[in-house]
Amino acid sequence: MTISDNVRHGIEGSIVLKQKYGTKNVYDLSLGNPEMEPPAQFRKELLRLATSADTGLHRYMPNAGYPETREAVAAQLSVDFDLSFSTNDVVMTGGAAAALNITMKTLLNPGDEMIIFAPYFGEYVNYAANYGAVLRVVTTDETFVPKIDDIEAAISDNTKVVLANSPNNPSGVVLSDEFWDQLGLLLEKKEQQYGTQIYLISDEAYRKIIYDGLKYPSPLHHYRRSIIIESHSKDLALPGERIGYVAVHPDIDQKPDLINGLVFCMRALGYVNAPAMMQQVVSFLQSVTVDIDAYQKKRDYLYKSLIDLGYQLSLPQGAFYLFPKTPIEDDVAFVQQLQQFKVITGPGTAFGAPGYFRIAYCVDDRTLEGALEGFESAAKKFGIIG
Ligand SMILES: Cc1ncc(COP(=O)(O)O)c(C=O)c1O
């Protein structure tokens, strides 16, 4: 056999919608790949760098990233979270994906347990497998907020990491300060009970995409052993450029060890460093985002349209996904049926939540409007509207 058993297993386990359609004839709402352009300042900074007389812009730099970039990131984090971050708390990475991988590799011994909440970003399963971590999945009800009792039941003396994602892909749920407070207390209690250390990894790839004037509730204010995972794939619409970072809580214990571990894992996993040009550009864009109001308008339009068609869904507080219930139990069959109506979405099963489907609305308005006919045909076919 050419490829390894693990990789074959991964391929077979992935729910890949392989069918090919002409791009004109379908409404593809299956990808979290923003169609929005990056903010104007991005091109301006890129141009400035590209035409600069400075030399050495494309060399290796310290594995953790340029000190100036880490300093700029730390300064903005200090403002955002009202905590005192320093350059040494930040490691620049190739997006949240690399940030998650170096953090998991740094923390997890094979056999260590990592808790995730369903629905979850499907790649977590693959990343956990990279490090031999044992996943414990805590399910949620239709509010998509995990119950503290269920998390407690999932924690054992082998639990090393709890990985949370807020705003959540696919549900759009933003976890509240009250939730983080309860989780923080629980983790401290369990650490004492078992004499262990439990790290909270907070995947905040969509942190700046939140709606209705909400202020982002951060776990950093509730648990010191927190590590945040950030990305500019979504807030600056730069997914192809691979730029993001890890930051540790400024008061986390054993900080030098942790940072040295993250830096070592940048090398050991072959990432080496985050892309040089992008590090230099985003240094100047830390307080900038894409137009969040534009996403909120898309959310409101599609949410209302689907409610009118009889779909059951909750209004997401962040990210750019809707996660309605499928009108039939079999979400994979429903998604295939929608494809027949020229609308491509993702089955909840791929996110650990059968019975739902994910719609990515980070597309242009014409795609959203065009997809409604397919949603209506499916609603009629399965009898949720007459
Ligand atoms: C929840 C979540 N985490 C991490 C990532 C990876 O993002 P990046 O492009 O920054 O690697 C994604 C991408 O869609 C995501 O949805």
Image: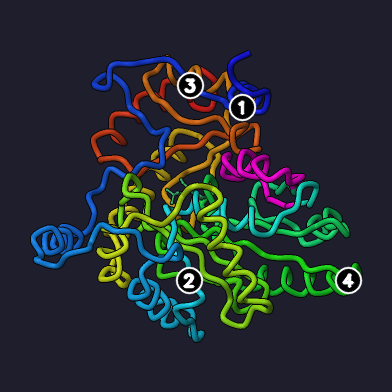
Of the image marks 4 and 2, the number of the one nearer the N terminus? 2
Rendering coords of residue 313 (x, y %) = 54, 43
**Residue 208 placement, left or right of 166:** left
| Classed neighbour count for the residue bearing mark 3: other residues with Cα under 10 Å, few (<14), some (14–19), many (≥20) | some
Q: CA distance from mark 4 to mark 3?
A: 45 Å
| Classed neighbour count for the residue bearing mark 1: other residues with Cα under 10 Å, few (<14), some (14–19), many (≥20) | few
Of the image marks 2 and 1, the number of the one nearer the N terminus? 1
Q: CA distance from mark 1 to mark 3?
A: 18 Å
Q: CA distance from mark 3 to mark 2?
A: 37 Å
Does residue 359 lie above or below 142 as drawn?
A: above
Residue 17: numbered disc? 3
Q: Amino acid at mark 1?
A: Val
Q: CA distance from mark 2 to mark 1?
A: 32 Å
Query: Magenta region: which residues?
Result: 114-137
Rendering coords of residue 93 (x, y %) = 44, 57
Q: Amino acid at mark 4?
A: Gly
Residue 90: numbered disc? 2
Q: Amino acid at mark 2?
A: Val
Q: CA distance from mark 4 to mark 2?
A: 28 Å
**SS state under label 2:** strand
**Quarter occupied by the N terminus:** top right
**SS state under label 1:** helix
On the image, numbered disc 1 is attached to which residue?
7
